[in-house]
Image: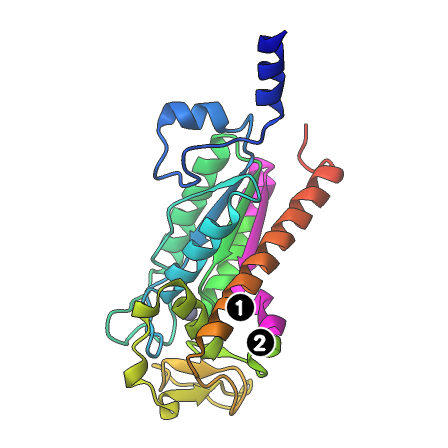
Amino acid sequence: MKLLWFVLAALALPAQPISRSLNDINWMQFQELIPSKIETILIPVGTMEAHGVINNGADNTAPEAIVKAIAEPLNAVYAPVLPYGVTGALAPYAGGFSIKESHYRAFLTDVLEGWAGHGFKNLIIVNGHGGPQTAILESIATDVGSRLRVRVMVINWWSLASDLTKEIFGEDGGHAGWNETAYVQAVDPKLVDAKRYSDDLATARPAPSTWFAYPFPSSIILYQPKQGYVRFDTDKAERYRKAVNERIRSLIADTVAKWDKAKIFRD
Ligand SMILES: [Zn+2]
């Protein structure tokens, strides 16, 4: 009787892997968990690109921190970050570069197919980098999802959090603006080189069809004129990080619940 109770209790418990990082578990642990107990994989992607006074890998730092924070409550695991991406007009700055779109598409498609082949049903890409990369990710998601009959989602964290940016900082943000700098500051203050900051490091994003420059003249790009200058407020940074993580967690939970309810690709 006691044994039966233990067996039933163990079956009722959510999966508890030694780590939610797929870098950290071995093949036997993987086999026990996926897909019988865990169907969702979080895949952080970013790029190498200048970011004002934060690290060139900020677009990797943020999605990596996000997936670490939300994997357990979502009963998900997370893949290693894909740290190279399609960079765009900031690629010429020191320490940045871009992967050719055709190579990026082919490589990321293979990555998604690889994980789908192991039985993950929900492939959630948490993207840290905008520009040309966002549309490319959406097109890869559609291609892989339709061919392999898996559910693929792409989340651009800074856009999804745009209302939280306005709420917490009282204004809109920018690329390497207050919002993105704050998220990185909350993850690791050492990555913020505050003493080098000045407002004239920032340029507002041009209105559509007004002007274009390659390379872009600043690595801090404000979404709106005179908003998003960096102010290094530790409390706001921490509040922002928590709010962003929760926003992303709840969007993924809702989306997976809706996919399940609709029995999408459940055959
Ligand atoms: Zn960025």
> Could you say whether the residue bearing mark 2 is in a helix, strand or loop?
helix
Which comes before the other along the chain, label 2 or label 1?
2
The structure residue drawn at horizontal position 37% and vertical position 66%, both measured from the top left corner, is 58
Q: Quadrant of the N terminus?
A: top right
In the rendered structure, the answer to whether residue 205 lies left or right of residue 171 reads left
Residue 140 x %, y %:
51, 51
Residue 141 x %, y %:
54, 50
Whether residue 72 is situated above or below residue 6 in the rendered picture: below
Residue 142 showing in the rendered view: no
- Residue 147 part of the magenta segment: yes
Residue 21 x %, y %:
40, 41
Tags 2 and 1 touching, CB below 8 Å: yes
In the rendered structure, the answer to whether residue 158 lies left or right of residue 218 reads right
Q: Quadrant of the C terminus?
A: top right
The structure residue drawn at horizontal position 55% and vertical position 28%, both measured from the top left corner, is 37
Viewer-closest of 237 and 171? 237
Q: Which residues are magenta?
A: 142-165
Whether residue 198 is situated above or below residue 133 in the rendered picture: below
Whether residue 99 is situated above or below residue 176 in the rendered picture: above
Q: Quadrant of ligand 1?
A: bottom left
**Kind of residue at disc 1:** Arg
Q: Residues within 10 Å of mark 1 (few under 14, many from 20)?
A: some
Separation of marks 2 and 1 at Cα, in angstroms: 8 Å
> Could you say whether the residue bearing mark 1 is in a helix, strand or loop?
helix
Q: Residues within 10 Å of mark 2 (few under 14, many from 20)?
A: some
Q: Which mark is residue 168?
A: 2
Residue 198 x %, y %:
35, 90
Q: Which mark is residue 73?
A: none
Residue beneath label 1, please?
239
Q: Quadrant of residue 5?
A: top right
Viewer-closest of 257 and 247? 247
In the rendered structure, the answer to whether residue 118 lies left or right of residue 142 reads left
